[in-house]
Image (cartoon, rainbow, N blue to C red):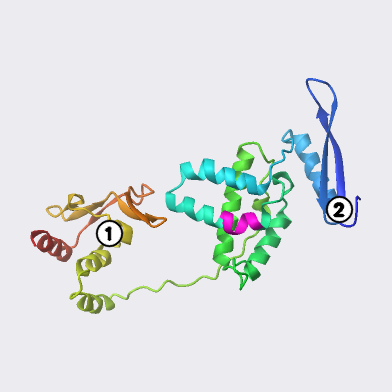
Amino acid sequence: QRSKGSWEIAIDVGRDPSTGKRLQHWETVRGIKRDAQQRLAELLVTIEQGSYIKPKRLTLGEWLEDWVNSYVTTNCSPRTVDSYQSEVRGHIIPALGAIPLTHLRPQHLQIYYAQALSQGRVDRKGGLSARTVQYHHRILFEALSHAVKTGLLGRNVAEVVDPPRPEHKNMATLAPEGVPRFLKVARDTPYYLLFYTALYTGMRLGELLGLRWCDVDLNMASLSVVQALYKRRGICEMREPKSSHSRRQIALSPSLTLLLREHEVA
């Protein structure tokens, strides 16, 4: 014990293959004696299994920045990149970023989730929603999984942490009998065709705004979803849908086909 609430671990981890000198792992554990014993047991298991990784002076914050900039930006959609960057830099790094990556424990995440729920807003005037905190857990889980895959960590501590469960809310949808009334009101607006197409195809707004005449085959009464309008940092751009499931062909109802034909002629 170094001081109250602080314990130091020293353990042999083998010998340097080039010099033959004995190598030791030194680590300070915050908490009670049981926490230090648990951490010691974890290290012994990694040594026995051959999965021990020599600690690097890399903080969780540094790893999150590196992971977002090098992995997320090349493997995720621009909207996901912006979202991850916002949550990582606005919430996760300020709360957990200073912790050395190899010293991160499940307790750190559990405490953070509890604090985020109670006072996690940036203005400190309340907590974040359970859904947002669950999203933070997902980000941390993915980042730590990548750290394990790249050899920086021996295990993902987020695997043993239970994130808060958001309350399930039934989505409000338009009842079938409400469709004619809605279209009757919308008929005199410039967006009547847009509303009609949305109701009878189930397309997302970005997909509707990305629809071109070359994507519509009125003779076959079908249309193809091949691009969508995305907004990123105030700039709109057309891109392919982010998944193969989103790229699809949709059959048109006779009434929608007629309406599109009339609009094309007009």
Q: Residue at horizontal 57%, vertical 53%?
A: 139
Question: Which quadrant would residue 200 be assigned to in this image?
Answer: bottom left
For the C terminus, which image quadrant?
bottom left
255 displayed left or right of 240:
left
Q: What secondary structure is marked by label 1?
A: helix
Instruction: Please say if 39 is above or below 130.
Output: above
- Where is residue 109 drawn, in percent x and y? 68, 57
Q: Which mark is residue 6?
A: 2
- Where is residue 148 drawn, in percent x and y? 64, 41
Viewer-proximal residue among 191 and 151 = 191
- Where is residue 129 drawn, in percent x and y? 56, 68
* Mark closer to the chain start, 2 or 1: 2
Question: Which quadrant would residue 131 be assigned to in this image?
Answer: bottom right
94 displayed left or right of 203:
right
Helix, strand or loop: magenta stretch: helix
Q: CA distance from mark 2 to mark 1?
A: 59 Å
Instruction: Please say if 4 is above or below 199.
Output: above
- Quick check: can you spot residue 161? no
In magenta, the rendered stretch is 88-94
Residue at numbered disc 1 = 208
Q: Residue at horizontal 38%, vertical 48%?
A: 243
Amino acid type, residue under disc 1 in the picture: Leu
Q: What secondary structure is marked by label 2?
A: strand
Amino acid type, residue under disc 2 in the picture: Ser
Packing grade of label 2 (10 A; few <14, some 14-19, many >=20) is some
- Where is residue 18 drawn, in percent x and y? 78, 20
Instruction: Please say if 146 is above or below 92.
Output: above
Viewer-proximal residue among 175 and 99 = 99
Tell how many labels.
2
Viewer-proximal residue among 135 and 257 = 135
